[in-house]
Image (spheres, rainbow, N blue to C red):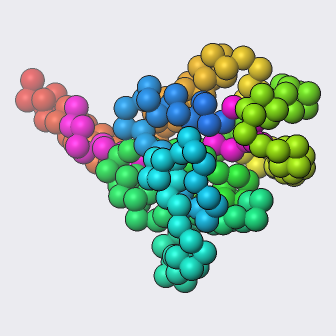
């Protein structure tokens, strides 16, 4: 098979969840396990935490630089979360999907909505739900990186985020991390096989060539 002929564009994999539902753990494992899968690294105006690395977890910039990126149309989506700005740089994403790599977006429902407006094809959206409100709060407390007020704000945001679950293509209830990851991985692998609008014409070209060659062989036999 002519692999170059049917080479697909990469998928835009939107993975959203309330904070504490396990989204980050699942996406990082997905990136490490699946080839041709990269994480979209967002820019943010919040301060870098002690366990974070610039360019790996986020690109940490100031408000002036963020506003400039919006003005110059260099962000695919952006949103204000807990008083800080977050956004997705455009150039790296387009370069990745054009080369056939799947790009994973760890973003909220606001960013997901904006991405759907910018890209009509090749988007797969997945929402991760916690098994219960009690478990969600327990996970936030166990992380031991936020104050009580911050945790309360995250729970308020979780309430708003969860209301948008039905805007997504798939929903996973993360009660068991291993099982949830296998579900997530299965979704991605099955979506890779689908014939999307962007690669249908290439496959049609390949099919027509196959039929032409078969016709020639049959007529000469």
Q: Residue at the location (61% across, 31% down)?
A: 25
**Magenta part of the chain:** 1-22
Q: Say which of 144 and 127 sits in front.
A: 144
| Residue 82 falls left or right of residue 178 | right
Q: Say which of 213 and 14 sits in front.
A: 14
Determine the image quadrant of residue 50: top right
On the rendered image, what quadrant is the C terminus found in? Answer: top left
Q: Residue at the location (66% across, 55% down)?
A: 112
Q: Is residue 149 above or below residue 2?
A: below
Residue 133 in view, yes or no:
yes
Q: Residue at the location (12% across, 29% down)?
A: 217
Determine the image quadrant of residue 136: top right
On the rendered image, what quadrant is the N terminus found in? Answer: top left
For the stretch drawn in magenta, the main secondary structure is: loop
| Residue 131 falls left or right of residue 144 | right
Q: Position of residue 96 (x, y in %)?
A: 37, 52
Q: Position of residue 212 (x, y in %)?
A: 20, 40
Residue 200 in view, yes or no:
no
Q: Residue at the location (60% across, 75% down)?
A: 63
Q: Position of residue 36 (x, y in %)?
A: 37, 38
Q: Is residue 10 magenta?
A: yes
| Residue 132 falls left or right of residue 177 | right
Q: Is residue 80 above or below residue 205?
A: below
């Amino acid at each position: 098979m002519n692999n170059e002929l049917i080479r697909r564009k990469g998928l835009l994999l939107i993975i959203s969840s309330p904070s504490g539902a396990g989204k980050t753990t699942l996406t990082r494992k997905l990136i490490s396990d699946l080839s041709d899968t990269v994480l979209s690294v967002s820019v943010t105006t919040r301060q870098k935490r002690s366990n974070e690395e610039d360019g790996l977890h986020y690109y940490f910039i100031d408000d002036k630089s963020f506003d400039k990126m919006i003005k110059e149309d260099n962000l695919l989506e952006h949103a204000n979360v807990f008083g800080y700005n977050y956004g997705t740089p455009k150039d790296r994403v387009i370069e990745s999907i054009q080369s056939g790599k799947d790009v994973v977006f760890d973003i909220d429902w606001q960013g997901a909505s904006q991405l759907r407006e910018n890209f009509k094809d090749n988007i797969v959206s997945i929402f991760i739900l916690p098994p219960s409100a009690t478990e969600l709060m327990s996970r936030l407390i166990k992380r031991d990186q936020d104050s009580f007020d911050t945790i309360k704000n995250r729970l308020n945001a979780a309430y708003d985020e969860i209301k948008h679950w039905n805007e997504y293509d798939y929903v996973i209830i993360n009660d068991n991390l291993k099982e949830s990851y296998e579900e997530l991985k299965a979704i991605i692998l099955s979506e890779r096989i689908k014939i999307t609008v962007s690669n249908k014409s290439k496959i049609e070209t390949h099919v027509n060539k196959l039929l032409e060659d078969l016709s020639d062989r049959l007529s000469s036999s």
